[in-house]
Amino acid sequence: MKVGIDMGTVSGGEPAKLDIEELLATRLLVQGNSGSGKSHLLRRLLEQSAQWVQQVIIDPEGDFVTLSDRYGHVVVDGERTEAELAGIANRIRQHRVSCVLTLEGLDIEQQMRAAAAFLNGMFDAEREYWFPVLVVVDEAQMFAPSVGGDVSEDARKMSLGAMTNLMCRGRKRGLAGVIATQRLAKLAKNVAAEASNFLMGRTFLDIDMARAADLLGMDRRQAEMFRDLKRGNFVALGPALSRRPLPIVIGTVETSARSSSPMLMPLPDAPQDVEDLIFTPDPEEFTRPIVRRAPPAPRPTTDILSELSRSTPVASQPAAGESRASGPEMSAEEREERLAAVLAEILGDPQAAYRTDSVLYQEFLVRARMRRVTGPPMAMGEFRRRVAIARSGVDEETAAGEGWQTALSLSARVSDDLQGVFLLMAKAALRGETCPSDQRIAKAYGTHSARRARRLLGYFEEQSLIIVHTDFAGKRIVAFPDLQAETAPGDPNAVEDDGSQHAAE
């Protein structure tokens, strides 16, 4: 079905039509300096297409939450864990609900991580939920920067990878990216290059004008025209808009942002006693507490974890009715027993499988202090190793065998987050158990995506660690050449009750 929405007018007063069906297949890039009308253009596009297609808006400033009042968009606060955001995004696709992910109040690195988790959650939805979605990302240069900035490399890679998936691989999954940026030079080229439709607004810097002219197929001498564009005026090009560069004026909108552009306001008439008003203190000022206007710089996570991991000093005189829960001395056996109990308590939570290692590690350190575990804190690397072994479900008899020691050495060839999955499969092979299902493998990795579980097996096979084959009944068998063992045939599509609300994926 062909649907042309009205974006405004072209020269001569004719309506400027945008083909939504074509846009879903070809994506859109909007560029313009601050104040050129990008947000107004996005709002016009969202309002006009709200009744025709599901919409998801990544909103770093909270400007688009007003769409919820008129068009029923669900507002999702970005101040959640990555696992929560991924789960919400997955359900957004299942139930085909339009939403606004507002990242207002988060710092830039938190915004990048939250947006990446949400986009990845939509990207990893099962095939049966690949309905068309218009995914609008405002200030895209923040989430797909061309160069590294003040954020960590891990956050940059995570966000850039999610944006690349959206623009490069999202079409087959029904995701149509609409990205807006203030500067093309700050946007990663592999993200910008995937758009086939362009709306270019007012631009002043030479490098941005040159790139805009190149994308529109214009002579670089014509790039000067972008400096003369008025607010709300854009040059359109693309199969969903026009086959030739076409100037358009964006139409009016029905909703408005919570923030607005600064407006001039005349000053009030100055009173005669203005100096007395300014320099005479209010008596209450001396009783008011001093408030620091500048917030303190955020503490690095490593410092917080280090402080949490320090053992609580033993008080010289315990309070009445209070005993010294932890003495100055603790044997290695007792310490190991307490650490194992804390680890088992954390991993006993059905939702622990879907929390990141960093979250579990913080909880582990806090609970270890509550149990009065003395000595140096467990390192993050050792914690991840123990979690991987615990999630494999290995028993004492198997753990004492030579085959398991070989499996542990082989697991060092994969990254920390994959060791739990590898050891789970190795344990099943050593004991001759049925091959774990996709759901079981996905849980060991901390996801609900069965497709991602199959990709993990493919990765292990590429590393020459395993060989995956099927029997005549179509059941999966995983063999470990280095262990000279293989799993029993198992149904990859089996559904297991993991004790959580997401058990039946």
Image (cartoon, helix red, strand yellow):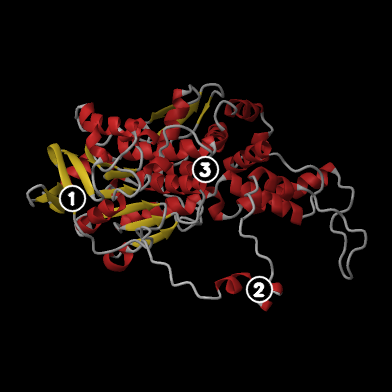
Q: Which mark is residue 281?
A: 2
Question: Mark 2 falls on what kind of element?
Answer: loop
Density class for disc 3 (Cα within 10 Å; few <14, some 14-19, many ≥20) is many
Residue located at (81% from left, 53% from top): 312
Seen at 20% across and 55% down, the residue is 49
Amino acid under label 2?
Answer: Pro
Q: Considering only vertical position in the picture, is 488 above or below 98?
A: above
**Spatial CA span between label 1 and label 3:** 53 Å
Q: Say few, some or many: other residues with alpha carbon within 10 Å of mark 2 (under 14 / 14 to 19 / 20 or more).
A: few
| Camera-nearest label, 1 or 2 | 2
Seen from the viewer's position, the closer of residues 346 and 228 is 228
For residue 444, which numbered disc appears in the image? 3
Q: Amino acid at mark 1?
A: Val
Q: Position of residue 18 (x, y in %)?
A: 15, 48
Q: Position of residue 211 (x, y in %)?
A: 29, 31
Residue drawn at 48 percent across, 45 percent down: 113
Residue 291 is left or right of residue 23, and the answer is right
What is the three-letter code of the residue carrying label 3? Ala
In the image, is residue 143 above or below residue 459? below
| First of labels 1, 2 by sequence position | 1
Residue lying at 87% horizontally and 63% vertically, measured from the top left: 323
Seen from this angle, which residue lies furthest right? 317
Is residue 374 visible to us here? yes
- Mark 1 vs mark 3: give the one in front: 1
